[in-house]
Image (spheres, rainbow, N blue to C red):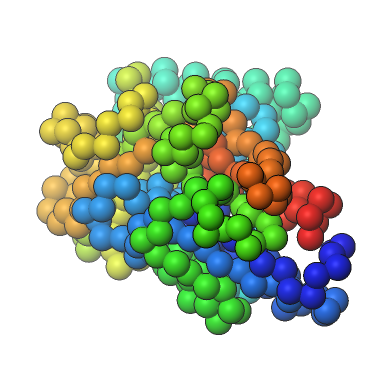
Amino acid sequence: MKSNQPNLKIAIIGGGLVGRLLGWRLAKQQSMIDNGITYNINIFEKGSLLPPPSQKDKAAAFTAAAMISPMSELVASELEVYQLGQASLKLWPQWLKQLDSSQHFHQQGSLVLAHPNDIGELTQFQRDLNHKLRDQLNALTESEDLTVLTDRSQLEALEPSISAHFNNGLYLPSEAHIDHNEVLQALVSESQKLGIGFIENCAIEPDDEALKGFDILFDCRGMGLKSDVKNNLEKQDFRGVRGEVIRLECKEVTLQRPIRLMHPRYKLYIVPKPNHQFIIGATEIESEDRSSISLRSSMELMSALYAVNPAFAEARIISQDTNLRPAYMDNLPRIESHSTRFDKPIIRINGLYRHGYLIGPALVEQAIQRAQESCL
């Protein structure tokens, strides 16, 4: 790294997934490279680092299923998201091993299913995926990354708990998911051991006087960008996309991997979590409403769960949650370089949309590289 300063003061605004990953990677990198420079890293979070379920403006990272699914997302996303996802799929197990959290990374693939009446949706999903693999990636990877399941016994071999009326599906063996709440906590505890300071309940903007003494700033605020009155032009291209999830506990059902359920109107997912818990949700709702989950959404989500296995009827609801995913109008992430009014460099990472866990590590690597080239 290039710097004439023996002690570099770094501020990270936003303590969600990206802010935590970024701080931890910077501190970890410093601990592995002895170049005479020390980092003084502080992460500023507007709310609590461990927010209660009732907190409405918590980081989107807490309202997530944490699927690392580049193949599944390729159908409805740009190629850039797929490429970032593939890079993150390699980084996650490496980073979690360094965090002593490798047990929270699960790479048993994912299943895409449809009710018999909706089999056309599954067929269309397969066609769209093959089209992008062939025409955009010039790849024929069905044998490695996509398996068409045409027999009930194939489904049972992967997930014995799947209801008997499912006979077809797609298996994407390379995909993964993580136990996100456990990883978010581990990032804080391990970062503190590396000397990172966390300032909770501190809503702050890049031009605030309190940040004048820092040498470089990273803006990872997510939806917090909307509260920045100095970014009116950028805010016109920025929005929140509502997400809704329900967390349940059901000791009668065991799933090894995420299940995506195709439907003409919505796409649902079920993701296993520790202690016999599951998260169910829908991909997106074009709304910035943060209010509680609606009765209609609850019924649709839980009906899908019941269809996968009737034993879910006895599940216990742990929480129902909503949140906004930060997104630009093209639904693509951005890493942008600016300067504060104190003429200090600031790198903004935002617009991860519904792909935070899918692309977060790859974006953090890119942001650190940009900082190395220009500031560090």
Residue 143 in which image quadrant: top right
Question: Which residue lies at the image location 52% right of the left edge and 73% below the top edge?
Answer: 197
Residue 286 percent coordinates (x, y): 36, 24
Reply above or below: 334 against 253.
Answer: above
Tell me what residue is drawn at x 70 percent, y 48 percent. 343
Number of labels in the image equals 0
> Residue 133: percent from the left, percent from the top?
68, 28
Quarter of the rendering occupied by the C terminus: bottom right
- The foreground one among 57 and 90 is 57
Question: Is residue 188 something that shows in the picture?
Answer: yes
Q: In this view, does 52 lie above or below 85?
A: below
Query: 285 or 197: which is nearer to us?
Result: 197
Q: In which quarter of the image is the N terminus?
A: bottom right
Q: Which residue is drawn at 42% across and 38% down?
A: 227
Q: Where is residue 63 in the image (x, y as percent from the top left)?
A: 35, 49
Whether residue 163 can be seen here: no
**Residue at (84% x, 65% y) in the render:** 3
Residue 198: x %, y % from top left? 48, 69
Task: From this view, report whether residue 51 is shown above or below residue 292.
Answer: below
